[in-house]
Image (cartoon, grey):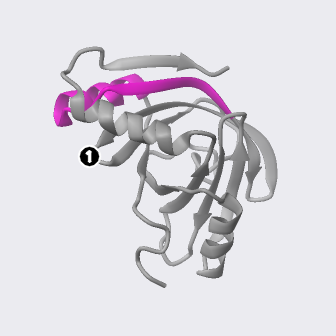
Amino acid sequence: MSPQGFGQIDQIGYLVENLDASIQFWIDRFGVGPWTVFRNVPLDGVYKGQAGTVTIDVGLSYQGNVQIELIDATNDTPSPYRDADGKRLLGIHHTAHIVDDLDAAVAKASGNGLRVVFEASNPATRVAYLASDSEPGLLAEFIIGQGMREMADAGIAAAKAWDGSNPVVEITAG
């Protein structure tokens, strides 16, 4: 398979302990902004065969054409955001691709030896995380949602034009 099999990496996701502190770190240390923060985002899904609703707070910004996603898991539901003992995972978590056909992307990745560990959705999006035993600790995410590519393009443009003002816009999902 070509290394470009799914196109460019659209997002790098990090799991954080304190979303607000992590956003401030990215602003102060890397000059990344502005940020869009979504609070109380529910993801109804199946993690390793177990159904549940995961809730997260998410911060999104851009470095060049790559979205930086900061995820703060806000409940204890088993998910790809926690280890087998339920302890919160922290640090780099996944790379992601925005796709036009989630089922086709998952089928292609599965055919390349990845296995689905989490599939979830909410009214705005559907996601799938896939893993490989040969690269433990890193997940591949595929994302689909109405207007997702346009939202990314708008975020890239906003980051390129950002003058440091209005560093965070918050949206409450639930």
In the image, residue 30 lies in the stretch drawn in magenta: yes
Residue 154 percent location from the top left of the image: 40, 34
Q: Which residue appears at 44% of the width and 82% of the height?
A: 2
Name the one closer to the observer, 49 or 149. 149
Q: How many marks?
A: 1
Above or below residue 108? Residue 35 is: above
Residue 16 percent location from the top left of the image: 43, 37
Residue 29 percent location from the top left of the image: 18, 34
Above or below residue 8? Residue 27 is: above
Which picture quadrant has residue 90?
top left
Residue 109 percent location from the top left of the image: 60, 73
Mark yes or no: residue 91 visible.
no
Q: Is residue 5 left or right of residue 31?
A: right
> What's drawn in magenta, residue-wise?
19-42
Name the one closer to the observer, 2 or 70. 2
Q: Residue placed farthest to the top in the image?
A: 166
Name the one closer to the observer, 64 or 109. 64
Above or below residue 147? Residue 158 is: above
Quadrant location, the C terminus: top right
Q: Which residue appears at 22% of the width and 29% of the height?
A: 161
Q: Is residue 71 left or right of residue 54?
A: left
Mark yes or no: residue 25 visible.
yes
